[in-house]
Image: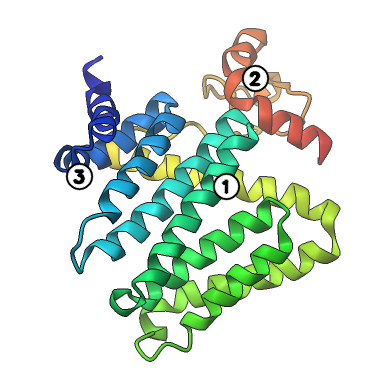
Amino acid sequence: ERESFALEAFIAGAELGDLNSLFLVREEAKEVAFKKGRLREFAASMDKYLRLLSAVDHVTVPQQVVLYAIEAGEVHEAAFQQTDQSADYKNAVLSYKFGCDAATRRVEVMSPITTLHAWNCLGLALKRAGEYGMAYRAYRWAYQCLTHPDFSLLRGKSLHDGLMTNLGALNYAMSNPTEAAFSNREGLRQQNEEHRNFIRNKSGAKPPVAPSSEACAGCGASGGHNLLNCACKRVKYCGKACQEAAWAAHKKDCKRWRKHP
C-alpha cells in the first residue's frame, strides 16, 4: 500500500544503515505504525537507528539519541499494550536504559531537563514492571538533575512535578502491590491512548466515538433506553452486530472493567 511506504522505507533504512532516509521518514513512519498496528516493527527499527546515530561524532547527537530512545521506549510500551507479550515491555526498558546511558556518557553536552526525562521514563517503566528497587535508583538519578546549575524550574516544572508524583506512586506501590498491578496496566493504557490521539490529531482523522450511556459504542448511533448493556456495564450497543464489530478494540477494556468494576 502507498500509505505504508514511509514505514517500509524506515525499516529498510534501518537494515541498510542509511541515516539520511531514517531521518527523513521517521515521523511519517511512526504515524503509519500506529495506524496499521505495526508498532513492534517500527520500535525495533528505532532501536537500530539509535545505535547507528550514537556512533556519529557531533555535539548535537547525544541529545537527539536520548530523545529518540525515549520515543522508542514509548512505542515498545504501546506494542506491549497491543500484544501483551513481555518481550515488548523488556525492549521498552532496554530502550530507556540506552537513552540514560547515552545521557550519562555525554553529560557535558546534555540538557539536564532531557536527562531527567530519560531517567524518569526508565523509573516509571521499571515500576510498572514491578522492579521497584531498580525504579527507585532510576528516580534518584533523575532527582540529581534537579540540582544541576543549568536546570530551570520554569522550563522543567512539569517534569519536576511528574517526578515527585512518580516517587509518591512508587512508595504507594511498594506498600500496596495488588492495587499497583492494576494501576500499572491502566497507566500504560492511558499512555497508549495519548499516543494514538496525538497521531490522530496530526493526521486529521476523527477520534472514535466515546463510550456513552446514550450512544452505541460500535456505530455511535443514539439509542437511549433501546441500547443493550455490554457485560462490563460501561458501554452499550444497538445489538449483537455492533458489539461483534467493536469487540476487537473493546476486548481488553471489557475484561479489565469486569474484573475491576
- The reply to whether residue 235 is visible in this rendering is no
Three-letter residue code for mark 2 = Tyr
- The residue carrying pointer 3 sits among few (fewer than 14), some (14 to 19) or many (20 or more) residues within 10 Å by Cα, namely few
Q: Tag 1 or tag 3, which sits nearer the N-term?
A: 3
What residue do we see at 60% from left, 76% from top? 140
Residue 46 spot, x, y in % from top left: 36, 41
Q: Which of marks 3 and 2 is in front?
A: 3
Which label number is shown at residue 108?
A: none
Residue 215 spot, x, y in % from top left: 59, 28
Which label number is shown at residue 237?
A: 2
Residue 110 spot, x, y in % from top left: 32, 74
Q: Is mark 3 on a helix, strand or loop?
A: helix
Q: Do the residues labelled 3 and 1 touch (CB within 8 Å)?
A: no
Q: Quadrant of residue 260?
A: top right
Which label number is shown at residue 23?
A: 3
Q: Where is mark 1, residue-wise?
A: 190
**Mark 1 vs mark 2, CA separation in Å:** 23 Å
Q: Which residue lies furthest to the bottom in this view?
A: 149
**Mark 3 vs mark 2, CA separation in Å:** 44 Å
- The reply to whether residue 115 is visible in this rendering is yes
Three-letter residue code for mark 1 = Gln
